[in-house]
Amino acid sequence: MGKHGAEEGREAGTAQRRRLDQAAELCAKRGQTLTPLRRRVFEIVLAADRPLGAYDVMEILARDRGRVAPPTVYRSLDFLVSQGLVHKVLSVNGFVACSASARPHDAQLFICGSCGSSVEVAKKSHAGLIEEEAAALDFAIESVVLEVHGRCHACRLATANPTVHP
Amino acid sequence: MGKHGAEEGREAGTAQRRRLDQAAELCAKRGQTLTPLRRRVFEIVLAADRPLGAYDVMEILARDRGRVAPPTVYRSLDFLVSQGLVHKVLSVNGFVACSASARPHDAQLFICGSCGSSVEVAKKSHAGLIEEEAAALDFAIESVVLEVHGRCHACRLATANPTVHP
DNA sequence: CGTCATGGCGTTACTTTATAACATGACATC
DNA sequence: GATGTCATGTTATAAAGTAACGCCATGACG
C-alpha cells in the first residue's frame, strides 16, 4: 500500500459528516462508542477512494495526532470492522469503508489492479448458492470472503483510448 | 500457521506419486519444469490436510535439505500457484493443493476455523452471477477470491456429541 | 467518599509474512 | 569458451500484525 496517492482523508464533506454521525448513533444503539480516535480513523478510511493499509492510516493519523503505534490503529480498524462500518480486504491487506454502512456483513468487492479502487456490490445473489454448497458439505458458514480482481471501467478507458504523444 | 500438527508431508502414497507425475507432465507440456525443489514443495503441500504457511513448508523442507531461505520457498509456491497446482488462501496466509489439479483457475474454498481443514468446490455456479455484475460495472475480471469460513462437518459433530467425562 | 471494575488507549517489544537485490550454479547454444 | 537463460542460494530488510503490560478516565457500588 501507499502508492496511488489520492484523497487521503483530510476534512470530511457534509455527506461524510453525516455518515460519521450515523455511525456514532449506530454504535451507541449497540452500546458501543465511536470514540474520537475511532471516528477519526473511520473518517480517514471513508475519505480514501481505495483500500488503505493499516500503516497508511497510521501515517495519516500521525499528521494530526503525532505518532501512533500499530496496535492503536489495528484496534480502531478492528472495531470498525466489527461494527460493519469497514471491510478488511484480504487480497490487498487493506481496509475500505463499507459502502452501505449497516450491520456487520460480508462484502463483495470489485478491486481494480490498476488504480486500486474498489467497488462494493450487495451480494445477495450468491449467498443462496454458497449456502446450498455449504449445506451439502454440512458446513456452518461464519463468513464469506469474495473479492474480484481486474480492471475497472475508468482504467480500461484509459488504455483503450490513451492520450497519445506521437 | 504452525498449529494443528497433522500429516505434514513425509512420503507420498501412490495416489500422490501419480499426482506429482501428472503435474510434471503438465508443466512439461507448457514448457515449464517441475524441478526437484518444486516437486518436493508440491509434495509437502499435497500431503498436508490443511493450508500450510510458507514458513511451515520451509520448516518441513529443512528436514531433508537443511535450511532454505524464504525466497526459495515463495518462488516455488508462486510457481505452483501459477501452474494452478496450488491455491493461495488469503484468509489464512497459506497454501493448499488444488483438489482437481488442472490449469490455473480460481478456487472456492470452505475453510474450517476449528481444525483448519479446507475443502475446494468447483465454482461454476457463481461465475455467471459475478460476471453479470462485472459486466454491469464494465469491470474486466482477472481473478476471483472466494473463501468461506465456518465449521466443518467433523468439527460440528465433535462439539455436538462431545466425548463427555462427567 | 473511597475503591474497584471496565473500557479505551499508549508503549514496548516482538512475531509472522513477504520481497528486493544480488550472487551462484547448471545447462544450452553458438 | 563466451553468452544467455533459468532455477536456486543468500543477505538483508520491508510490511503486516500481535502479545503483554500499564495508565487513566469513567462510572457503579458499598
Image: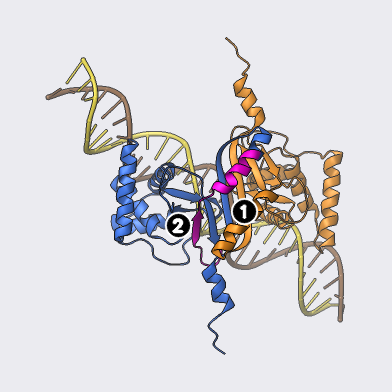
Chain colours: A blue, B orange, C brown, D yellow
Tell me where residue B10 appears, x and y as whole percent: 78, 38
Q: Nearer the viewer, residue B140 or A65?
A: B140
Q: In this view, does A161 lie to the left or right of D23?
A: right
Q: Tell me if residue A57 comes above or below residue D4 in the rendering.
A: above
**Residue name at image x 56 percent, y 44 percent:** A144
* Separation of marks 1 and 2 at Cα, in angstroms: 28 Å
Residue A11: quadrant of the picture: bottom left
Residue at the farthest bottom position: A166
Specify few, some or many for label 1: CA neighbours under 10 Å numbering under 14, 14-19, or 20 or more.
some
Specify few, some or many for label 2: CA neighbours under 10 Å numbering under 14, 14-19, or 20 or more.
many
Q: In this view, does A23 lie to the left or right of B32?
A: left
**Residue name at image x 38 percent, y 49 percent:** A69
Q: Which of A81 and B78 is in front in this view?
A: A81
Which amino acid lies under the numbered mark 1 shown in the image of this protein? Leu
**Residue name at image x 36 percent, y 59 percent:** A60
Tell me where residue A153 appears, x and y as whole percent: 54, 68
Q: Nearer the viewer, residue B120 or A56?
A: B120
| Mark number, residue B129 | 1
Tell me where residue B54 appears, x and y as whole percent: 65, 48
Q: Per the image, is A151 magenta?
A: no
Q: What residue does disc 2 label?
A: A52
Q: Do labels 1 and 2 share a chain?
A: no
Residue B83, visible in the rendered structure: yes
Residue C27: quadrant of the picture: bottom right
**Residue name at image x 63 percent, y 36 percent:** B116
Tell me where residue A137 appears, x and y as whole percent: 68, 35
Question: Which residues fall within the magenta stretch?
Answer: A113-132
